[in-house]
Image (spheres, rainbow, N blue to C red):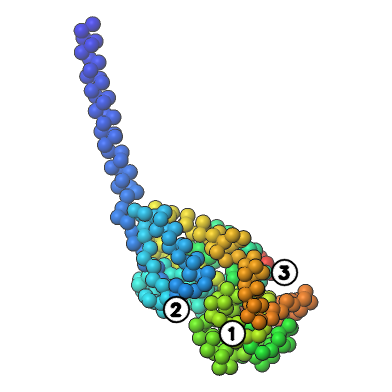
Amino acid sequence: MTECISKKPGRFSVLFLAVLVAFVIMPAVSYGAQKHKEMKLTMATYFPVNYPYTYEGGKLFVDMVNKRGKGIVRIDMYWGGTLLKAKALVPGLQAGTADLIYHVTAYLLGSYPVLGVQCLPVWNNVSESFDRLKVGTPLYKLQNEVLKKKNLFQLATGGTISEFIWTRNKLVRKPADMKGLKIRVAGKVQAKVIQALGGSPVTMPSAEVPQALQRGVVDGVVMNPWTAQGRGVEEFCKYMLVLPVSNLTAPVYALSDKWNSWPADVRKVLMDVAKDWESKYIAKKGSILCDEQIDTILMPFYAKKGMKAIYPTKKEIAAFRTATRPVVDWWVKQVGEDVGRKALKYTNLK
């Protein structure tokens, strides 16, 4: 009996010691595998803090990452070209000046033509494009497969923002009305659209638009109604053709190799935020920017300013689509038949 009693404490001591060692070692192993010094990422954009809607969207992304990623990853954001001007954003990303950029797709089409699918006149509205472009969709994956070959990764997009034609004095209802008009555009796809409609494209940043309209340097602009409100386009234009002749997106980009080099927990925070951010930013009803705002906020604003909104008939819409179809075919040649046709299957093109 004495022998049995004396052995039990020994067995208990061994068991207790084993549990204690495991308790001490396991957190250390876990800490070593997952814990690292909070990673600081630099993010840049040319959007100023007073840019309507777009600033709110970008700030939301940064705030969400910094809140959810506390202790894991933090973004230091530079607005209004304070770190990199618009044309320097991609070179700055490549040089390592910025780790992430929040940039308009139109500026990237020369080097990354696959992104042109976001700008083509193949999207009817924000909501439909969101469903086709958001994180994880076939079109999202296809674009990143192509972008990876040039070391670029598109983290998040959201939907496309419809761009309308605004004119100073001439009312435009059909393609023939565009003949000879000098129209400001932001990028290649928009320029091709205006050429296809018989106008003359003039490329310039949106910040220069008010002065160009005031001086008659251009007869009109291709611009989305959200940005136009912030640029005061209604002060210089009498008419607005309410038809998406092209589209705009403002995705978040990183270098592909740098993205893959970041710790798994950092990438997880960024990707989880990207998915939630898209639905809160450019998406459907209730997001920062959505279709409903055109009728409930923007059109009443422009009407109050004395502008006339032109709503084309189905026949007139078909005429514009026919006139701009060569732009779609041009883009397909830019990216190659295989990629181009595959991408178009995921759009709203009929």
Residue where numbered disc 1 is placed: 235
Q: Position of residue 289 (x, y in %)?
A: 57, 66
| Label 1 element class | helix
Where is residue 303? Give x, y as percent.
Answer: 66, 77
Amino acid carrying label 3: it is Lys
Q: Image quarter for residue 13?
A: top left
Q: 229 and 329: which one is in front?
A: 229
Which marked residue is nearer to the observer: mark 3 or mark 2? 2
Three-letter amino acid code of the residue under disc 1: Glu
Please state which amino acid type lies under the numbered disc 2: Ala
C-alpha separation, residue under disc 3 versus residue under disc 2: 34 Å
**Which residue lies at the image location 66% right of the left edge and 85% below the top edge?**
238
Q: In this view of the protein, which residue sits in the foreground, 23 or 221?
A: 221
Do we see residue 227 in this rendering?
yes
| Residue that mark 2 sits on | 86
**Res 144 label:** none
Vertical placement of 37 versus 214: above or below? above
Decide: is 39 above or below 99: above
The span from disc 1 to disc 3 (Cα, nearest Å) is: 36 Å
* Quadrant of the rendering where the N terminus is positioned: top left
Image check: 1 left or right of 196? left
Which image quadrant is residue 151 in?
bottom left
Could you classify mark 3 by the number of other residues whose Cα lies within 10 Å: few (under 14), some (14-19), or many (20 or more)? few
> Which residue is drawn at the image coordinates 47% and 66% (left, top)?
58
